[in-house]
Amino acid sequence: MSLRLRLCLTLLVAPLLLLLLFGTWQLHQDAEQRRAALTARLSDNLALLRDPAAEKAPAEADRLALRLLSLDEVRGVTVRANDGRPVNQVGAVAPVPAGSPRAGLIRHAERWHLQLPLTSPDNTRAPLWLDLTLRDSVVDLPYYRQLTQFMLAWLATALLLGGLCFLLYRRLFATLDDQRNALQRLYAGDYAFRLRPGGPPELATTSTAINAFGEYLQAAQEDMRQQVEQATADLRESMDTIEIQNIELDGARRRALEANRVKSQFLANMSHEIRTPLNGIIGFCRLLGRSQLDDHQREWLKHIEMASTNLLSLINDILDFSKIEAGKLRLASVELDMAELVDEVLVLQAPDAQQKDLQLLSLVYDDVPRALLGDPLRIKQVLTNLVHNAVKFTERGEVIVRVQLEESLGNKATLSVKISDTGPGLADDVRQQLFQPFTQSATVSTSRVGGTGLGLMICKQLVEQMGGTIEADTQPAKGTTFSVSLPLRIAPRAVQRPPAINLDAMHIAIQEPHTLTRQALAHLLRGWGAEVQVLSAPVTGEGLATGTQLLIAALAQGGLSAQVAQLRHQLGERPCRLLLLVNGEPQSTDEALTLPQGARLFYKPLTRARLVQALKPLLGDAPAALLTHAFPGQGHDVQGQGIAEQHHHQPRVLAVDDIETNRLLVGELLAQLGVDGVLAESGEEALALASGQRFDLVLMDIRMPGMSGLETMAALRRLGGAWNHCPFVALTAHAMPDDSQALIDAGMQAVLTKPLDTDALEDLLANYLGLVLSTPTRHAAPMPRADDELPVVDEELGVTLAGGRQELAERMLEGLLESLDASEAELRDSYSANDTTAFLDAVHHLNGACRYCGVPQLALVAEALESRLRAQGIEAVDDVFTTLLQAMQRLRDWRASRRPTPV
């Protein structure tokens, strides 16, 4: 409520309202008094005029009425009976209300009436009533006169109070308005304005304060102006300095970008340069694996190939690691099996663990889904680092990897991975800084164990980018446990893990001192259908259950011959096959170890695949069902039915490739594996073959003239029916991780890299067709050359790549030689036109053609040219292109030298 309204209510409205209320009450009281006095006066006059002795006679009543009419206040008289009926009327009589009369002054029909009874001497009920009609001026006229006087007085009072309020308002609020105006002008910046002195004393003090405030603001404004001028001058100087610094920073930024570009180019070149010899190492390992090797050599070769393959995968993704700090590292989402992945990690770390006689074991619980979607390379990197650290810092005891299902919701699964060891543990200060860079445990000398201290930091970043967590729990002198929570998605075709082998109630006894290994081994064997007896005492023939067919016994490192002889002595004449567990690496002395009939050595760590491989030779005379190896596939029988029972028809595979030599080799490999292969040289031909024919699998080249591999796949999918579920596998000569992931995202189920590896093809056919394949024929590998230069043509390598078929190798080589001129013309034309797409297609075509021919020089240069072209563009391949043309000419020269000299 405003001050003006409160002042008006206080000085004007409230007094007038009170005065009005008081006047109304006073008028009412005066009217009541006048009516009471009139009633008393008329009653007294009636008492003087009537004759009590004769008032019962009607004639006397009439005479009394005439006397009353002579009074000034009376206008008319009516004599009424007790029931209200008029008996006599005199003068101007006004109508009265119906009903019995009642004593008193009443108003009816705008007239005042006074009704009085005519009582008898004995005070009995009066038989007659007098109704006096009064004149208007007797009652109303004094009331109106008094009301008029009151209203005049009230109006006079209102005028007086209104004038007083107006004067007070003018004096008070004029000063307040001036003060408000002064504050507004000060707020607007008019600091020179001042109020004139005057006004009420109470407000004069406020006016003085406002003027003082204005003077202060004016002085402050002047001081601020001086400070602003000084600050402006300083700011100009700072701006000049900042501009110079911005120029310097821009130059530094350009130099940093250039340095980063050079670093990225260096990493790309180095990764390719390292990848090339690694491809050679892996290739020769695979060729060596096809030669006649004993079990120890094959085991060592498998370790070399696995380590080289992992190193190659890391080198292919070396550029991704530089993206971690920038937050641009992309994680793959491909199908993986945690059991196989953990087993691979343990096999790689086994040599270091076996040197310390550590028990290295993986426990993948049965509730873990078999097929998950994630980045196997990054998960393997994390596990490898954690297991390697556990082995490195543990001198005795065990290193256990446990994988179990922590939570499952829909198609999402959260795995709990725990890596525990029995090492010395970690100090509290080290544990708090464990995931910081360049931090290592102080419990072991870093000079002895080596390392940079970056591994755990990278593990933490990778796990967090996957959406998980990693933490360490340690107890001094009792070991450390690293816990990784890993959220993954369940693959759409994930099914329950089938038994890796069907043991069909085979009786097996286990003698293993390490508790967890013994429990894990017993659990696996029972899951595969065996009846297991766990031995707690030393092995004896009498201690074995009746009908025991296989004894799995652990041996200590060293002195294997003596331990085997003692074990056979303890068994006596008991016929029983032996699987001897050794926690160590195969030694050269093991070759001279003579094992009894039906015995086999098994070198830890214990993994599913290696255990199945070791059990198969020991089931030679067992029922046929025992020899069945259940490969993971789509809907195949895992109970060991024969091939004919598993498949009601021979599998048919459609292979699409625009290079004739590639098609020939794929067809030959499929034929050797017992698969009906149908070949197509283009996407259009594949569509024509698809009409009315059934195919169980499609091997699809990606870069083809006309319809590409992805376009062909999409067209086949649109045919509907069985094509909606037919698996497609990409064949490509240049598949980096990003390229492979892009192909899988586009709809491919898998990617095979040229040259086509027979083992990879066998695994793929087993996965998608459920085939049980026999071991392929091994071919002798060519001996390495004494010199460092690769040969122009390696005929033995060509035969090996052709699956051991001399005729096929010669046909593929001849096809490559015939296409050299056309390939060179296409390369030169597209390079001269600076057409990157056409040039890449020509290089890719030549690279694919070289993959299956024994032309090492040309194959290496073609691979290098395609890698450089994809990474840096056509502008950076001049030197490699020149080298390619020279390699093609050397191949022509070789062909010319092989032709017979004309006579």
Image: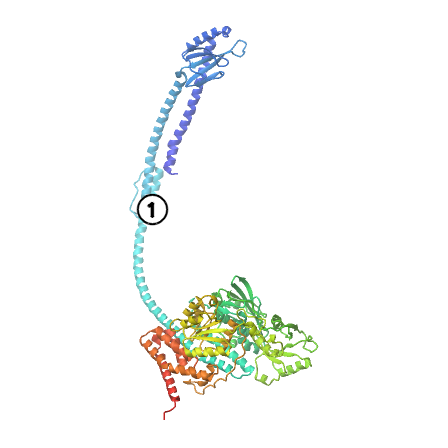
Tell me where residue 463 appears, x and y as whole percent. Answer: 49, 67
Look at the image and tell me in which quarter the C terminus lies.
Answer: bottom left
- Residue 476 image-quadrant placement: bottom right
- Closer to the camera in the image, 842 or 207: 842
Callout count: 1
Tell me where residue 790 appears, x and y as whole percent. Answer: 42, 84
Image position of 398 (left or right of 862): right
Tell me where residue 743 appears, x and y as whole percent. Answer: 44, 70
Residue 356 in view (yes/no): no
Tell me where residue 848 appears, x and y as whole percent. Answer: 41, 77
Residue 91 in view (yes/no): yes
- Amino acid carrying label 1: it is Phe
Disc 1 is placed on an element classified as helix
Q: Which residue is mark 1?
A: 213
- Residue 321 image-quadrant placement: bottom left
- Closer to the camera in the image, 474 or 534: 534
Look at the image and tell me in which quarter the N terminus lies.
Answer: top left
- Residue extending furthest toward the right: 542
Whether residue 597 is situated above or below residue 520 in the rendered picture: below
Residue visible at 36% across and 27% down in the picture: 157
- Residue extending furthest toward the bottom: 903
Image position of 581 (left or right of 805): right
Image position of 582 (left or right of 861): right
Mark 1, Cα crowd under 10 Å, few <14 / some 14-19 / many 20+, is some
Q: What is the image's colouring? A: rainbow
